[in-house]
Image (spheres, rainbow, N blue to C red):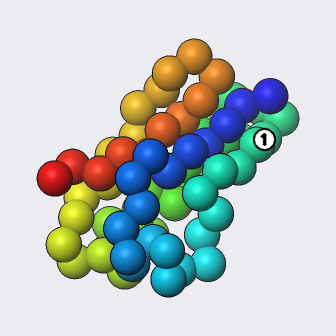
């Protein structure tokens, strides 16, 4: 199992319908989903923050650049 975790959640994220923790069966599926989420967060709803992805073992962590 692979996880996607949103490390720090700004108010925009909390108001969105995105989930803060997701489990997926494959690494590729989790990577593609985390990229999709990061792009939505950066382009569609949060003008104040920038989000990045880092891989830690079986987890893709979406973090906030402050």
Q: Based on the displayed image, in which of its 4 quarters is residue 26 positioned?
A: top right
Would you say 34 lies left or right of 27 here? left
Would you say 45 lies left or right of 32 here? left
Q: Residue furthest top?
A: 57
Q: Based on the displayed image, in which of its 4 quarters is residue 17 positioned?
A: bottom right
Where's residue 24, x and y in %? 78, 41
- Residue shown at 56% from the left, 45% from the top: 5
* Residues packed near mark 1 inside 10 Å, few (<14), some (14 to 19) or many (20 plus): some
Can residue 61 be seen in this snapshot?
yes
Position of 2 relative to 20 (above/below): above
**Front residue (pair 27, 22):** 22
- Residue shown at 16% from the left, 53% from the top: 66
Circle 1 sits in a helix, a strand or a loop, which is it?
strand
Where's residue 56, x and y in %? 50, 21
Where's residue 43, x and y in %? 33, 73
Can residue 32 be seen in this snapshot?
no
Q: Which residue is mark 1?
A: 24
Quadrant including the N terminus: top right
Would you say 57 lies left or right of 45 here? right
Q: How many marks?
A: 1
- Residue shown at 51% from the left, 60% from the top: 37
Position of 34 relative to 54 (above/below): below
**Front residue (pair 9, 3):** 9
Would you say 1 lies left or right of 40 here? right
- Residue shown at 48% from the left, 38% from the top: 61
Position of 29 relative to 45 (above/below): above
Position of 35 relative to 41 (above/below): above
Where's residue 50, x and y in %? 24, 58
């Amino acid at each position: 199992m692979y996880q996607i975790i949103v490390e720090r959640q700004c108010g925009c994220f909390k108001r969105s319908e995105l989930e803060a923790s997701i489990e997926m069966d494959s690494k590729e599926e989790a990577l593609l989903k985390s990229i999709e989420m990061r792009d939505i967060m950066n382009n569609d709803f949060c003008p104040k923050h920038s989000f990045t992805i880092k891989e830690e073992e079986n987890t893709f962590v979406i973090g906030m650049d402050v």
